[in-house]
Image (tube, rainbow, N blue to C red):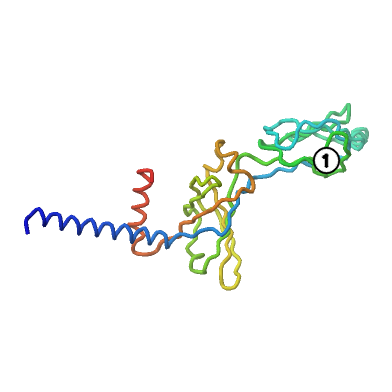
């Protein structure tokens, strides 16, 4: 056998060993991940409620309208407010509400930026005290709530800060981390609700995809306690550096 043939043989053996090693690491990584049975994007919601009963004399917003902090939402004329003011009751304006003591009008304002997703009050309608006027769904602060069916051993390997891959409705993927997990046992399996946070989930270019209630899928990386944990982490770091 010539040196050229020997070199080719050793290279073939080396490449085969490297390939087998990589396949074992990939298999090990897949064995230490869990796929959600269901997952949903949850956006923060702020309900605007009336402080006094009264008549809506001006409606400034409709469903689907974008608002920013401090935008005017409704003007409400209240006889109850006028009576309290006449009786020297102190009623102070706040960030959410401006008081016109002369006209007895309450002006409700947005306390967060977002989208008006529900409107309960229309111009000319009567509101009782504490009745909701509208709901604003925020454009930031989104999280994902995902459900997993796990064995007790799998649940023991879920940890705070564990990396998560989220797949959005357009099949694009973003990264997140485990924030918390709540568990309930059903028929020997742990039904786990995992709260996932992601900075990428709150970027402006995802506003149309990452809407409140949008379905996604989540893959959580479990804590790897095996002998291949180190090589697997090193391979994942290398792939991340090269953009894979």
Measuring from the top left, give residue 30's x and y in whole percent: 42, 60
Name the residue located 91 percent from the left edge and 38 percent from the top edge. Answer: 80
Residue sticking out furthest to the top: 102
Q: Is mark 1 on a helix, strand or loop?
A: loop
Measuring from the top left, give residue 180's x and y in whole percent: 56, 56
Q: Residue 103 versus residue 244: which sits nearer the camera? A: 244
Judge whether 121 appears above or below 166 on screen: above
Q: Quadrant of residue 122?
A: top right
Q: In which quarter of the image is residue 2?
A: bottom left
Judge whether 152 appears above or below 117 on screen: below
Circle 1 residues within 10 Å: few <14, some 14–19, many ≥20:
some
Q: Relative to 46, is 4 on the left or the right?
A: left
Name the residue located 51 percent from the left edge and 56 percent from the top edge. Answer: 160
Measuring from the top left, give residue 37's x and y in whole percent: 56, 60
Measuring from the top left, give residue 243's x and y in whole percent: 38, 43
Name the residue located 34 percent from the left edge and 59 percent from the top edge. Answer: 25
Q: In which quarter of the image is residue 84?
A: top right
Q: Relative to 182, is 2 on the left or the right?
A: left
**Which residue does the numbered mark 1 point to in the structure image?**
51
Name the residue located 7 percent from the left edge and 59 percent from the top edge. Answer: 1
């Amino acid at each position: 056998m010539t040196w050229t043939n020997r070199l080719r043989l050793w290279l073939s053996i080396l490449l085969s060993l490297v390939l087998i090693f990589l396949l074992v690491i990939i298999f090990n990584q897949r064995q230490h991940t869990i796929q959600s049975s269901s997952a949903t994007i949850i956006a923060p919601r702020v309900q605007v409620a009336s402080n006094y009963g009264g008549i809506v004399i001006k409606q400034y917003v409709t469903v689907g309208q974008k608002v920013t902090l401090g935008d005017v939402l409704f003007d409400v004329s209240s006889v109850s407010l006028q009576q309290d003011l006449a009786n020297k009751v102190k009623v102070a304006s706040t960030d959410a509400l401006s008081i016109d003591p002369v006209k007895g009008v309450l002006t409700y304002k947005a306390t967060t930026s977002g989208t008006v997703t529900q409107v309960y009050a229309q111009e000319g309608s009567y509101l009782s005290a504490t009745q909701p006027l509208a709901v604003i769904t925020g454009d930031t602060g989104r999280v994902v709530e995902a459900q997993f069916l796990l064995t007790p051993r799998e649940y023991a390997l879920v940890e705070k800060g564990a990396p998560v891959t989220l797949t959005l409705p357009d099949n694009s993927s973003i990264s997140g981390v485990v924030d918390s997990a709540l568990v309930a046992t059903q028929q020997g399996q742990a039904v786990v609700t995992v709260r996932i946070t992601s900075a990428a989930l709150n970027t402006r270019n995802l506003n149309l995809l990452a809407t409140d209630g949008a379905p996604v899928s989540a893959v959580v990386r479990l804590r790897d306690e095996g002998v291949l944990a180190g090589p697997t982490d090193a391979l994942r770091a290398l792939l991340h550096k090269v953009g894979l």
